[in-house]
Protein backbone atom coordinates (compact mmCIF):
# COMPACT_ATOMS: atom_id res chain seq x y z
CA UNK A 1 0.00 0.00 0.00
CA UNK A 2 2.87 2.39 0.82
CA UNK A 3 4.34 1.89 -2.66
CA UNK A 4 0.92 2.48 -4.25
CA UNK A 5 0.59 5.83 -2.46
CA UNK A 6 4.11 6.83 -3.48
CA UNK A 7 3.42 5.87 -7.09
CA UNK A 8 0.17 7.83 -7.00
CA UNK A 9 2.04 10.92 -5.80
CA UNK A 10 4.54 10.57 -8.64
CA UNK A 11 1.74 10.24 -11.18
CA UNK A 12 0.05 13.31 -9.73
CA UNK A 13 3.34 15.19 -10.10
CA UNK A 14 3.42 14.55 -13.85
CA UNK A 15 1.24 17.60 -14.65
CA UNK A 16 3.83 19.73 -12.83
CA UNK A 17 6.49 18.16 -15.03
CA UNK A 18 4.57 18.98 -18.20
CA UNK A 19 3.89 22.57 -17.12
CA UNK A 20 7.47 23.33 -16.11
CA UNK A 21 9.52 21.39 -18.62
CA UNK A 22 11.76 23.47 -20.80
CA UNK A 23 11.65 26.64 -18.74
CA UNK A 24 8.22 26.63 -17.17
CA UNK A 25 6.02 27.79 -20.04
CA UNK A 26 2.31 27.47 -19.60
CA UNK A 27 -0.72 27.68 -21.85
CA UNK A 28 -0.30 26.52 -25.43
CA UNK A 29 3.41 25.79 -25.02
CA UNK A 30 2.78 23.37 -22.12
CA UNK A 31 2.28 20.47 -24.54
CA UNK A 32 5.36 21.43 -26.55
CA UNK A 33 7.41 21.62 -23.35
CA UNK A 34 6.21 18.17 -22.32
CA UNK A 35 7.11 16.82 -25.75
CA UNK A 36 10.55 18.45 -25.54
CA UNK A 37 11.17 16.81 -22.15
CA UNK A 38 10.00 13.42 -23.44
CA UNK A 39 12.26 13.78 -26.48
CA UNK A 40 15.24 14.59 -24.22
CA UNK A 41 14.58 11.37 -22.27
CA UNK A 42 14.27 9.37 -25.50
CA UNK A 43 17.59 10.80 -26.77
CA UNK A 44 19.19 9.81 -23.43
CA UNK A 45 20.05 13.45 -22.72
CA UNK A 46 18.26 13.27 -19.36
CA UNK A 47 17.09 10.57 -16.99
CA UNK A 48 13.41 9.80 -16.70
CA UNK A 49 11.41 11.00 -13.72
CA UNK A 50 11.11 7.35 -12.69
CA UNK A 51 14.90 6.98 -12.50
CA UNK A 52 15.20 10.22 -10.52
CA UNK A 53 12.41 9.07 -8.19
CA UNK A 54 14.13 5.79 -7.32
CA UNK A 55 17.47 7.53 -6.78
CA UNK A 56 15.98 10.00 -4.33
CA UNK A 57 14.02 7.25 -2.57
CA UNK A 58 17.24 5.35 -1.92
CA UNK A 59 19.03 8.41 -0.58
CA UNK A 60 16.29 10.31 1.30
CA UNK A 61 13.27 8.06 1.68
CA UNK A 62 10.08 9.97 2.23
CA UNK A 63 7.51 11.11 -0.30
CA UNK A 64 7.93 13.37 -3.29
CA UNK A 65 5.24 16.04 -3.19
CA UNK A 66 6.31 18.34 -6.05
CA UNK A 67 8.32 17.92 -9.24
CA UNK A 68 9.49 20.45 -11.81
CA UNK A 69 11.83 20.08 -14.77
CA UNK A 70 13.61 23.24 -15.81
CA UNK A 71 15.88 23.84 -18.79
CA UNK A 72 18.50 26.56 -18.94
CA UNK A 73 20.75 26.81 -22.01
CA UNK A 74 20.29 23.12 -22.79
CA UNK A 75 20.95 21.91 -19.23
CA UNK A 76 18.02 20.25 -17.46
CA UNK A 77 17.45 20.21 -13.69
CA UNK A 78 14.74 18.34 -11.81
CA UNK A 79 13.48 20.35 -8.82
CA UNK A 80 11.94 18.07 -6.21
CA UNK A 81 10.23 18.71 -2.91
CA UNK A 82 9.82 15.77 -0.55
CA UNK A 83 8.85 14.99 3.01
CA UNK A 84 11.23 12.68 4.90
CA UNK A 85 9.99 10.00 7.34
CA UNK A 86 11.18 12.35 10.13
CA UNK A 87 8.78 15.06 8.90
CA UNK A 88 11.37 17.35 7.33
CA UNK A 89 10.85 19.08 4.00
CA UNK A 90 13.73 18.62 1.57
CA UNK A 91 13.98 20.74 -1.57
CA UNK A 92 16.38 19.09 -3.93
CA UNK A 93 17.79 20.06 -7.32
CA UNK A 94 19.06 17.13 -9.35
CA UNK A 95 21.06 17.24 -12.57
CA UNK A 96 18.63 15.60 -14.98
CA UNK A 97 21.45 14.10 -17.06
CA UNK A 98 23.34 12.41 -14.21
CA UNK A 99 20.85 12.13 -11.35
CA UNK A 100 23.35 13.77 -9.01
CA UNK A 101 22.17 16.41 -6.53
CA UNK A 102 23.25 19.96 -7.37
CA UNK A 103 21.55 21.68 -4.45
CA UNK A 104 19.62 20.74 -1.31
CA UNK A 105 17.62 22.65 1.30
CA UNK A 106 16.15 20.95 4.36
CA UNK A 107 13.75 22.45 6.90
CA UNK A 108 11.12 21.48 9.45
CA UNK A 109 7.54 21.37 8.17
CA UNK A 110 6.53 24.18 10.51
CA UNK A 111 9.11 26.68 9.24
CA UNK A 112 8.13 29.47 6.85
CA UNK A 113 9.57 29.46 3.34
Image: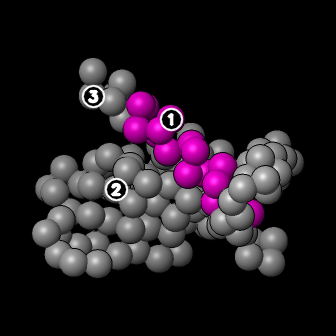
| Residue on which disc 1 sits | 11
Quadrant location, the N terminus: top left
- Number of marks: 3
| Residue on which disc 2 sits | 82
Provide the secondary structure element on which disc 3 rests: helix
> Mark 3: few, some, or many residues within 10 Å (few <14, many ≥20)?
few
**Label drawn at residue 31:** none
Q: Is residue 54 above or below residue 59?
A: above
**Label drawn at residue 2:** 3
> Mark 2: few, some, or many residues within 10 Å (few <14, many ≥20)?
many
Residues at badges 1 and 2 in contact (C-beta under 8 Å)? no
Quadrant location, the C terminus: bottom left
> How far apart are labels 1 and 2 at the CA level?
14 Å
Which stretch is magenta?
7-22
- Mark 1 or 2, nearer chain start: 1
Provide the secondary structure element on which disc 2 rests: strand
Q: Is residue 57 left or right of residue 110?
A: right
Q: Nearer the viewer, residue 56 or 78?
A: 78
Amino acid sequence: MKHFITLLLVLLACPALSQHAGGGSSGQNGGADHDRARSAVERNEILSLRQIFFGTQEQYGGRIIKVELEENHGLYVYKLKLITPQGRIVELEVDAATGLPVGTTEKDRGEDS
